[in-house]
Amino acid sequence: MNVATADTAADGPRGRKPRRMLSRRNIILYGTLFVVAVYYLLPLYVMVVTSLKGMPEIRLGHIFAPPVEITFQPWVKAWAQACTGLNCDGLSRGFWNSVRITVPSVLLSIAIASVNGYALANWRFKGAEVFFTILIVGAFIPYQVMLYPIVIILREMGLYGTLTGLVLVHSIFGMPILTLLFRNYFTALPEELFKAARVDGAGFWGIYLRIMLPMSLPVFVVAVIIQITGIWNDFLFGVVYTKPDLYPMTVQLNNIVNSVQGVKEYNVNMAATLLTGLVPLLVYFVSGKLFVRGIAAGAVKG
Amino acid sequence: MRSQSERPNPLFRNLNAKIASIPMVLTALVVFVGGTAWTVLYSFTNSKLLPRWKFVGLDQYERLWSTPRWLVSIENLFIYGALSLIFSFVIGFLLAAMLDRKIRFEDTFRTIFLYPFALSFIVTGLVWQWLLNPDFGVQHVVRLLGWESFTFNPLYDRQLVIYGILIAALWQGTGLIMCLMLAGLRSIDEDIWKAARVDGIPVWKTYLFIVIPMLRPVFVTTLVIIASAIVKVYDLVVAQTGGGPGHASEVPAKYVYDYMFLGQNLGQGFAASTMMLLSVVIVIVPWAYLEFGRRGRR
Amino acid sequence: MNLTVPSSASVSVKDLSLDFGAVSVLKALNLDIAEGEFVVLLGPSGCGKSTLLNCIAGLLDISDGRIFIKGRNVTWQEPAERGIGMVFQSYALYPQMTVEKNLSFGLSVAGTPKDEIARRIARAAEILQIEPLLQRKPAALSGGQRQRVAIGRALVRDVDVFLFDEPLSNLDAKLRSELRVEIKLLHRKLKNTMIYVTHDQIEAMTLADRIAVMRGGVIQQFDAPPVIYNRPVNRFVAGFLGSPGMNFLEGRLEGGEGGWHFAADGISIPLSTYGFERNPQAGPAAFGIRPEHIALNSGEDWPFSMTATVEVVEPMGSDTLVWLLVAGQKFSVRVSAERAPSAGDTVTIGFDPMRASLFDGEAGKRI
């Protein structure tokens, strides 16, 4: 029987073990994390304060000093007046080029890869795995090896130096990771769902559009995150496959900051750098956990 | 109506799936296999401004390996590669282990450590170029604090410039490594930690003798990811130093681009990129063998 | 610490509470476990049984209360200091170490002399019959072997109390029943106090000296298995044990001329043989009786009998379950296979209310 024994002793430890917030372990742990966090944030801070100072203030002070007189002039100049070569219409040109590159590239690459991943997951045909393996192994080949053959292919198609050509290149090089992402996602969906739809008479496209697509919003979001940041941040393909007028933002930014002519305007440079980093940073902070999932997905092997 | 006995042409079975896979097949065969083979093949020619099918044997490679700029690039790649591998692993693991200790504000810390990874190498390179600027940046600030003789000017020092690039690369990339390691740590059965506590094993010994050995697959994956990123390093150097001072911070990927598209010496570019391919193969093949070869196919 | 706790108690839990934020997981829980006793914590998932075990082990910080092991107040002690060994559902073996290293690692960290370690491993290996496995790694072991090694890791620690956290749930049915017997033998051999968490009532019934049935962070009943089975304190305990569960009739408890009786939908069951727990009061009540306590076509004279029509017959091998309608409610009756009727037959059922359980209408407490 559950005889409750009389609690004769009133003293002795009781309840939660007292933990001091300022134990040695916590000081070391949080102290280290805090210092490291400051180190990681410092460059962002320096970018922001530098971009808000005037040049005289920069010459007199140091990079960590907060601006005495806040000015948005560097931002205006970076956006609308900074020069690359003969063009002096600022980063806005590169920004719009990047938009015109990123949007269709993201759409096209995800459309191709999702359908392809769906086919690999649910409609396996002979040889599919071979091509898929080549695709995944190909992701490890340094781009430099394939740069010139693609120049030739694009030239033959009449697309060399055009935005369309660059969109195509991004779709090609986004394919391995995205196909892997979608294939793994669709494979993980219950197979009964697919079988039931087939028994109901739905075909390849019907199942994709009506069953798979509506169930796959999260993975599409992850794919969009991977692609926006990846394509926006690209430099190599932009510089190889487009002409100066069509350079994406990263290439133009590099040309503005690293141009040898004229006096260095560090505040304009930092404003331009921040502007270029703004889109991926926005994606990063808005997407939060999904960004991490995207990274994890990229790291998971097939 | 098809008669029962007539077998459908196997090519048209599952036709839609095959249509959907056309881009993959073209990419795999034409770009990845075809393009790679083409480049390797043309690295044995004396192509200059335009690819030319004039076989010259290993000439390009001999010239490559006697070009000081290429040798510097390789040396840099080794220093940068070895150090970034070590530091990424150590820093990434330590950060992940700290975040895994059921701390407060875990999400905030993770967000802070990872945000540089969202930025491009161009942005990274330019920020660190500014931070390391001898007249305004870190060196200047420390001197203002009273340490007049302090010298930290890696970007204008031929001996140190690669370390300046390393600092920027670690800032950008360790967040990713931390995330991979954290995912690995989180995948470890909670009961293992409980068992170790019941056994009275101190936390650091649990990490050293139990957890780290369990993370071997994560480490291998991370190693491959870091290694293939190291070989590709390009934009960061372009933005931060432009390969300078002199050729002190050149890397192979930049060598390839410069010879192919600026130097009008395609043959050299092809040979150099083939060497890059070779270095990746040396990393990837043993890994693929270990990962997939031993256990058969998945 | 001079604390007086019941001298016979091996593990004693006093007013233990555990909250996660606003959620209260364990509520002022008391439990006294005697030296050498085998106690099973039984309940549906989420009832707090594993949580309670983790609190006793020191793996969870409690919000209030005290825990004593062997008379020592261990409330603030680390798990390793408490004199416990624990076996986990997922085995939690260290995968990169051999079986021998798994057994010895904790001891060598604690600085136990080498020959002592060897002696203890030899003993544990002999008791559990894992000597041939000592040099293998966990991946090369079967599920049953892994669980044996996990028990061995608790065994070498030479502890007072063994804690088992659903140790057999990951095994298939056959292995589970084999290891169940082995654990019982182990307890007989070692005579240690053992606390065992499970949701499997058969494990609980077969292993336990006493079972603590839990729900919602509260111990419902703590008693020997036959008492729990035959005299459940409330409807929850009555319904949780037994398969198929106890048959219930909803109706009214009524007094009157012929003494107390239970009335439901046209039938009236006399309760003259029923042993009341407390003074009965007229009102809504539930009448429960187990399938094996009902006789079918026995020809004997029962305090209560009636006729009913067989709905479904389920042969179970050793015996047969017969489902019929009694007062509009589904009843199962367990009969031997050779005496099974067919569906549609009209049969006579009879039982003695002495074997039944009565619960009041509101709280479902035993009357």
Image: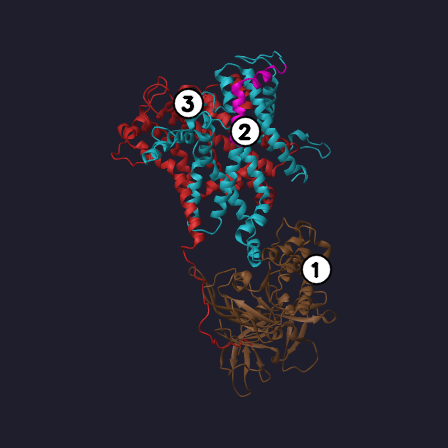
Chain colours: A red, B cyan, C brown
Q: Is residue A206 visible?
A: no
* Kind of residue at disc 1: Ala
Does residue A29 lie above or below B120 as drawn?
Answer: below
**Mark 2, chain letter?**
B
Residue under disc 3 on the same chain as residue under disc 1: no
Which of the image's four quarters has the N terminus of chain A?
bottom right
Per the rendering, the mark at residue A299 is none
Per the rendering, the mark at residue A247 is 3
The range drawn in magenta is B57-81
* Kind of residue at disc 3: Tyr
According to the picture, the residue beneath numbered tag 1 turns out to be C122
| Mark toward the viewer: 3 or 2 | 2
Q: Residue furthest front?
A: B149
Task: Judge the density around disc 1: few (<14), some (14-19), many (≥20) Cα neighbours within 10 Å.
Answer: some
Q: CA distance from mark 2 to mark 1?
A: 51 Å
Q: CA distance from mark 3 to mark 2?
A: 32 Å
* Kind of residue at disc 2: Phe
User: Circle 3 sits in a helix, a strand or a loop, which is it?
Assistant: loop
Residue C116, horizontal then vertical, whole percent: 66, 60
Q: Is residue A55 visible?
A: yes
Question: Does the residue at mark 3 contact the one at mark 1 (Cβ under 8 Å)?
Answer: no
Residue A192, horizontal then vertical, whole percent: 60, 46
Which of the image's four quarters has the C terminus of chain A?
top right
In the rendered image, residue A67 lying in the magenta stretch gets the answer no
Residue under disc 3 on the same chain as residue under disc 2: no
Residue nearest the viewer, comparing B37 with C334 = B37
Displayed quadrant of residue C134: bottom right
Question: Does the residue at mark 3 contact the one at mark 2 (Cβ under 8 Å)?
Answer: no
**Mark 3, chain letter?**
A
Question: Does the residue at mark 2 contact the one at mark 1 (Cβ under 8 Å)?
Answer: no
According to the picture, the residue beneath numbered tag 2 turns out to be B78
